[in-house]
Amino acid sequence: MKKLNDHVAKLLFCLIISVPAFSQTETFDIVTYHPPKDWKKDARDGVINYTSVNSSTGSFCVITLYASSASTGDASKDFNRAWNELVATPYKAGSNPQTETQTTADGWKAVVGATPVKVDGNDVYIILTVFSGFGKTLSIRSSLNDQAYTSQIDALLETMELDKTTAAPVNNSLTEKSPGNGGIGKFGLMNYVAPQGWSEQIFQDGVVFKPLDLPADELLAVQVMMPLSGAGSLEQALAQSFEEATIMYKGSSMYQADGKYGKKEAHTSFNGWEYIRGKGGIQVENGTPYKTEVGLELFIVRINNRFERVAILESRKNCGGVSRYYASDRIDYRNSIESFLYSLQFADFNAAVLKPGSVKGDGIVGIWQGIIQSTATAAFRIDAYSLILLTNGQVYFGPNFPIEGLNGLNTRIPPELNRRDWKTYTFSNGKGNLKMIFADIPFRTEGDKLVITKNQQDWHFFKLKSVDGARFSGTYKMSESYEMIPVITFTADGRFTDNGVVRVLYHDNTNCINPGFKPGSGTYDVKDYTVTFHYSDGRKVKIAFMGTDYDKSNPSPPTLRMSFDDNIMTRQ
């Protein structure tokens, strides 16, 4: 690090001495310079990279020039802003590096800072040089793993001449930040509800949300983009928006079987607006020759003569060398994203007012269970099915009970993601119809049973009792899993100590995103067919609990069944 700091001082000395360049020059934005010889050049909108790689030693250096922007009028503030954007955020580096400041012969203030970082486990040095003056600021970032490259960085900077007269583009950052408490915000004609527990940054050309508890080495950002005006189809708007977002994030496209991204069929949401969504991968610069793969998802809404757009950029990481995952594969993050997207409102569009449904109601409203011939396969197969009849006329009819139960579930969103199993129903005078996407299925009531007729055969369903306020007492174990016997202890006063059970009940083999991966203890509560585990370390895990074979009058039954597929736990 001392050698690196010595180079910072030397670099400033080079910057304040004008050295004429006699060979071919290039111009980028407001800077004219002599490019390094035999380095690979990669130019994109607002960015130029020069890369040198020594394949025999593994050493490399990447010098990145960024287009100028409007200065704050304070060189230190310009540097701090650039450092946070170009170094601290992408590399998880400290926000207060040691810096040196000098004034060049042409009157520009130059601030230089450096820090060592880790990139995919490798040591890399980052040097950031920020010029400020004459209403403009320009940044140059150098990333290297061999300090022998510093002489070539010096040689490039010594040749640079900055144009004092060219006007810099207006900086689009308003630097307004708030903690993300679920408040209502506005961008153009779009009204949104900020996700709770996410930060919010407001710009002139967009709004960015990020989870406050995101792990330090991961990326997840939801960005409202400027709307796209004009005619055309949703598919065309998606294609154009994916290209724009790729450029915006300074990335390059990756190709998969169906092109640059996979897309879902366009639909009309329960709000009444048409939309389409697509997801693919792009590669972004990370300061090394080896780019980072990230996921890029676009959500496009057609409103009158324009397309409103939301981009989701997220890291894709390896978990223990066994599996890969996106940051939004965590259920909490994905739920926040979907709630944000489907709660969007627009000042010039009269959205339908449709409230979520509830299972708390009279008559047939509630949760029913039974067996039926599967509709998802051509072969004859009997499956256990759940039938959820809601107060607002919605119905769920399928083999997979909601994985987190119904507590806190906005029942308007699941049908957007799983149209086969969610639809509506009608009922009058003891008879009704499940109006599923694949068929209308008649049903009737007979005493305490609900009878569904399918394939000219009657199938009996029985209503589940409420489990609100349930308590458990005793120690329960499961069959061996993950090379251990999972065990959990409940107490009737609402406490638990878990050693592996919640991990199994959560049904996610990717340990990095399974919140039950670590053992722990805390409190639990039961509401709306959900057991919520509140760990003392801050984790909160929701597990479906339908109350199969459970009676609230007996908190210590021989077996307990939890999760959407009724996993069995046996009392010790």
Image (cartoon, grey):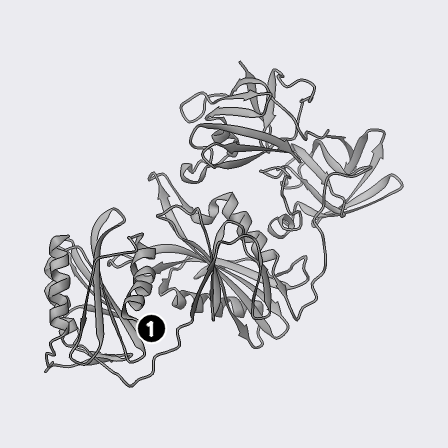
Q: Amino acid at mark 1?
A: Gly
The relative height of residue 406 versus residue 55 in the rendered view (above or below) is: above
Query: In this image, 28 relative to 281: left or right?
Result: left
Q: Picture coordinates of residue 225 (x, y %)?
A: 49, 67
Residue lying at the far top in this picture: please name it: 572
Query: Residue visible at 52% across and 48% down?
Result: 334
Query: In this image, 435 relative to 24: left or right?
Result: right
Query: Residue visible at 69% across and 63% down?
Result: 351
Residue 126 visible in the snapshot: no
Q: Picture coordinates of residue 64 (x, y %)?
A: 25, 67
The relative height of residue 64 versus residue 406 in the rendered view (above or below) is: below
Q: Label 1 belongs to which residue? A: 46
Residue 555 visible in the snapshot: yes
Q: Residues within 10 Å of mark 1 (few under 14, many from 20)?
A: some
Q: Picture coordinates of residue 59 (x, y %)?
A: 15, 55
Q: Tell me the quarter of the picture where residue 63 sits.
A: bottom left
| Disc 1 element | loop
Q: Picture coordinates of residue 273 (x, y %)?
A: 65, 64
Q: Which of the pair 340/35 is nearer the observer?
A: 340
Residue lying at the far bottom in this picture: please name it: 165
The relative height of residue 276 versus residue 230 in the rendered view (above or below) is: above
Q: How many marks?
A: 1
